Image (tube, grey):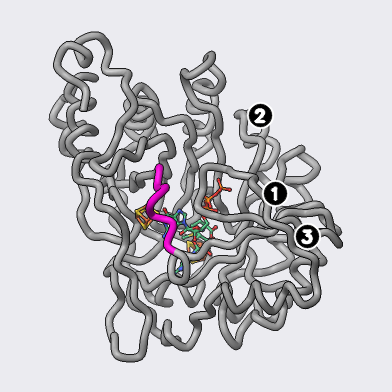
C-alpha cells in the first residue's frame, strides 16, 4: 500500500490487492441496457436503471484517468451493449488519447466487448480512436437459433458488423458461451468458420449471475473440460502461452492456424492470477465479478473529490478485493450465486 509521501508525489504506484495481485485491467460498463435479451444473460422483461442514475461519459473518463494514474494499462468498454449508449464514441476518443504515452505510462490497450449489432456504423470510428482488437459475442451461426438465444437479435446484422470490423482493420475474437443442448453441436462449425474468417474464438462457461426467466442455468451448463476433450478427437490442439491479460487459456488449432481459448470459471478457477476490476455506468466499482461487495465511486466523485481523494478511494476499494468467486451451479441451488445480471458489469 503506498504511503502518504508517495501519494503526495503523484500516487503512481500500481494498485495491489491484499493477495499481491496488481490491478492493471479495468472493465467499464457504460450502460446496463441492451438491444438483445440473451437467455443466459437476462430475463426478457428487465428493469433498467433510470438515465438520471448514470454517470456522464466525462465522469466515466475521469474515473478511468484515476485508474490509469495508478497503473491500469488495459481498458475494455462493455455493457449491456456498449455501442447503444448515445455518444459513446466520445469516451473512446478520449481514452484513445491516453494510449501509448511512453513505457509504463498510459494505456497499452483500449478495446471493447460487443454483441456486434451496431458495429457496422461504429467500426471505422473505433479504429480511428485507437482500438485494434474487439471481442464480439456470437453463440450460434444458425439464424433461427440466434434469434432464439438472443430473443431480439438478428444474426445477419451482426455478420454485417463483423465484415465492417474486418474492413476497418480490427482484429476480432469471437466469444461463445457454451450452452448444453443449444450450441454444443456447433463447436466444430464455429472453429471452422473462425478459421475461414481469420478470427480467434473463445468458449465460455456459463456463470450463475442473476435470475433468468425461461431456462434453468443447471440445464445449460456445459463444463468446458468435456468440450475440449471432445474437440481434441477431431482437431489438433496445442497449448499456447499467448496471453491477453484476460482469463482465457489458449490452444492453437493446427488445422485452422487460429487460436482457440477457454474461459473456465466453473471447472478451472483462474482467480489466483486476477488483475481486473469492474466499473459500472453508475460509478459502482465491483472488485470481483463473482461477489456482491462494491465501492461507490460516484459518491466520491460528486462530493467534489480531487485527484488525491479519488486515489485514496481506489486504494480503499482495492484493499477489499476478495480472493475469488463462490460460483456454484447444481440442482440443489435454486438461486444464482450473485444477484446482479452479467449485463450490470459487462462480464
Ligand atoms: N469469472 C470471471 N469471468 C470473467 C472475468 N473476466 C472476464 N470474464 C468472462 O469472460 C468472458 C469474456 O470476456 P471479454 O469481455 O471477452 O474479456 P476478456 O476475456 O478479458 O478479453 P481479452 O482481452 O480478449 O482476453 C465474459 O463472459 C466474462 O464474463 C473474470 O475476471 N472472472
Ligand atoms: C454481458 S456481455 C456485455 C457485452 C455485449 N453485450 C456482448 O454481448 O458482448 C459480455 C460477455 O458476457 C457473456 N455472458 C453474459 N452472461 C453470461 C453468463 N451468465 N455466463 C457467462 N458469460 C456470460 C456474453 O456472452 C458476452 O460474451
Ligand atoms: S450477453 Fe450481451 S448482448 Fe446478450 S443480453 Fe447480455 S449484454 Fe446483451
Ligand atoms: S471471479 Fe473475481 S477474483 Fe476471480 S478472476 Fe473474476 S474478478 Fe477475479
Q: How far, Cα to Cα, is label 1 from label 2?
A: 16 Å
Image point 64% across, 80% down: which residue? 183
Please tell me which residue lies in front, 286 or 78. Answer: 286
Q: Is residue 270 inside the magenta stretch?
A: yes
**Left or right of 89 on screen, residue 184:** right
The mark closer to the camera, 3 or 1, is 3
Mark 2 crowd level (few <14, some 14–19, many ≥20, 10 Å Cα): some
- Taking the spot 40% from the left edge, 51% from the top edge, the residue there is 31
Q: Position of residue 199 (x, y in %)?
A: 75, 53
> Secondary structure under badge 1?
strand
Q: Which span of residues is magenta-colored?
A: 269-275
Q: Which residue is mark 1?
A: 172
Is the Cβ of the residue at disc 3 closer than 8 Å to that at disc 1? no
Circle 3/circle 2 CB separation < 8 Å: no
Which residue appears at 49% of the width and 21% of the height? 98
Tell which circle, 3 or 2, labels the residue nearer the N-terminal end: 2
Identify the element where label 2 is drawn. helix
The verdict on label 2 being within 8 Å of ligand 1 is no
Q: Secondary structure at mark 3?
A: strand
Residue 23 image point, x, y percent? 37, 37
Which disc, if any, is residue 222? none
Residue 196 appears in the rendering: yes
Mark 3 surroundings within 10 Å by alpha-carbon count, few (fewer than 14), some (14 through 19), many (20 or more): many
Q: Which residue is mark 2?
A: 128
224 left or right of 194 in image: left
Residue bearing the label numbered 3:
253
For the residues bearing labels 1 and 2, Cβ distance under 8 angstroms: no
Disc 1 vs disc 2: which is toward the camera?
A: 1
Task: Return the residue nearer the eye: 99 or 201.
Answer: 201
Look at the picture and state if 169 lies above or below 142. above
Whether residue 109 is in magenta: the answer is no
Placement of 253 over or under 155, stated as above or below: above
Amino acid at each position: 500500500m503506498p504511503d502518504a509521501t508517495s501519494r503526495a508525489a503523484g500516487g503512481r504506484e500500481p494498485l495491489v490487492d491484499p493477495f499481491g495481485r496488481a490491478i492493471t485491467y479495468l472493465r467499464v460498463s457504460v450502460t446496463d441496457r441492451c438491444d438483445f435479451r440473451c437467455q443466459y444473460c437476462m430475463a426478457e422483461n428487465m428493469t433498467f436503471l433510470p438515465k438520471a442514475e448514470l454517470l456522464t461519459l466525462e465522469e466515466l473518463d475521469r474515473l478511468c484517468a484515476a485508474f490509469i494514474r495508478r497503473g491500469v494499462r488495459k481498458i475494455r468498454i462493455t455493457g449491456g451493449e456498449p455501442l447503444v449508449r448515445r455518444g459513446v464514441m466520445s469516451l473512446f476518443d478520449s481514452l484513445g488519447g491516453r494510449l501509448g504515452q511512453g513505457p509504463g505510462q498510459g494505456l497499452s490497450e483500449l478495446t471493447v466487448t460487443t454483441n456486434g449489432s451496431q458495429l457496422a456504423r461504429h467500426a471505422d470510428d473505433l479504429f480511428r480512436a485507437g482500438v485494434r482488437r474487439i471481442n464480439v459475442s456470437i453463440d450460434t451461426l444458425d439464424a433461427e437459433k440466434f434469434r432464439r438465444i438472443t430473443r431480439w437479435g438478428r444474426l445477419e446484422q451482426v455478420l454485417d458488423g463483423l465484415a465492417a470490423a474486418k474492413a476497418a482493420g480490427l482484429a476480432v475474437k469471437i466469444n461463445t458461451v457454451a450452452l448444453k443442448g443449444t450450441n454444443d453441436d456447433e463447436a466444430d462449425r464455429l472453429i471452422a468458420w473462425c478459421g475461414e474468417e481469420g478470427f480467434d474464438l473463445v468458449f465460455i462457461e456459463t456463470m450463475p449471475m442473476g435470475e433468468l426467466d425461461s431456462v434453468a442455468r443447471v440445464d445449460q451448463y456445459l463444463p468446458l473440460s468435456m468440450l475440449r476433450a471432445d474437440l481434441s478427437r477431431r482437431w489438433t490442439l496445442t497449448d499456447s502461452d499467448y496471453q491477453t491479460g484476460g482469463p482465457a487459456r489458449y490452444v492453437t488449432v493446427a488445422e485452422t492456424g487460429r487460436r482457440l481459448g477457454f474461459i473456465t470459471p466453473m471447472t478451472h478457477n483462474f482467480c489466483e492470477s486476477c488483475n481486473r476490476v469492474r466499473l459500472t455506468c453508475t460509478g459502482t466499482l465491483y472488485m470481483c465479478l463473482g461477489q456482491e461487495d462494491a465501492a461507490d465511486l460516484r459518491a466520491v466523485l460528486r462530493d467534489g473529490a480531487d485527484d488525491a481523494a479519488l486515489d485514496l478511494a481506489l486504494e480503499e476499494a482495492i484493499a477489499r478485493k476478495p480472493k475469488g468467486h463462490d460460483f456454484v451451479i447444481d440442482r440443489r441451488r435454486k438461486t444464482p450465486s450473485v444477484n446482479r445480471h452479467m449485463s450490470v458489469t459487462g462480464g
